[in-house]
Amino acid sequence: MARSCGDGVVRAAGAEFLGTGATAVVLTRVRARARATGREPVLPVLGALTVRDGRIVEVRPFSWDSVAIADACGA
């Protein structure tokens, strides 16, 4: 059964960008605090960004550390 941390706090801890043109790949480290436990794992997120007219028009995240999320939530 899936559990939700609910109402936690999420902050970007840093990012690295690769790419030129309309598509970029970004590796972001996100710090998230689970309200239920107070734990704050740093989670890597890899995503593809599409840029059009100088604006990000699409973000596709590809990687979350689901074990770290479950541990932080007390699962």
Image (tube, rainbow, N blue to C red):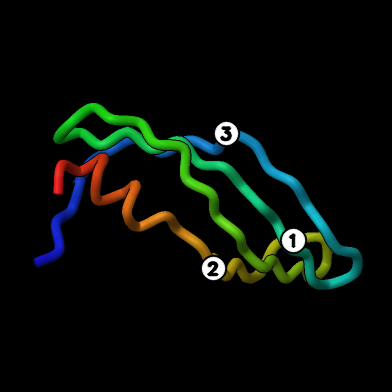
Question: What's under tag 2, amino acid-wise?
Answer: Phe
Label pair 1/3, CB-CB below 8 angstroms = no
Query: In the shown orientation, is residue 64 left or right of residue 38?
Result: right
Q: Position of residue 30 (x, y in %)?
A: 50, 41
Q: Position of residue 33 (x, y in %)?
A: 32, 33
Question: What's under tag 1, amino acid-wise?
Answer: Arg
Category of crowding for the residue at label 3, using alpha-carbon neighbours closer than 10 angstroms: few (below 14), some (14–19), many (at least 20): few
C-alpha span from label 1 to label 2: 20 Å
Point out the residue furthest to the left here: 1
The residue singled out by tag 2 in the image is 62
Label 1 or label 2, whichever comes before in sequence order? 1
Query: In the shown orientation, is residue 6 left or right of residue 21?
Result: left
The residue singled out by tag 3 in the image is 13
Category of crowding for the residue at label 1, using alpha-carbon neighbours closer than 10 angstroms: few (below 14), some (14–19), many (at least 20): few
Identify the residue at image location x=20%, y=46%: 5
What is the secondary structure assignment of the residue under circle 3?
Answer: strand
Label 3 or label 2, whichever comes before in sequence order? 3
Question: What's under tag 3, amino acid-wise?
Answer: Ala
Quadrant of res 40: top left
C-alpha span from label 1 to label 3: 22 Å
The circle on residue 55 is: 1
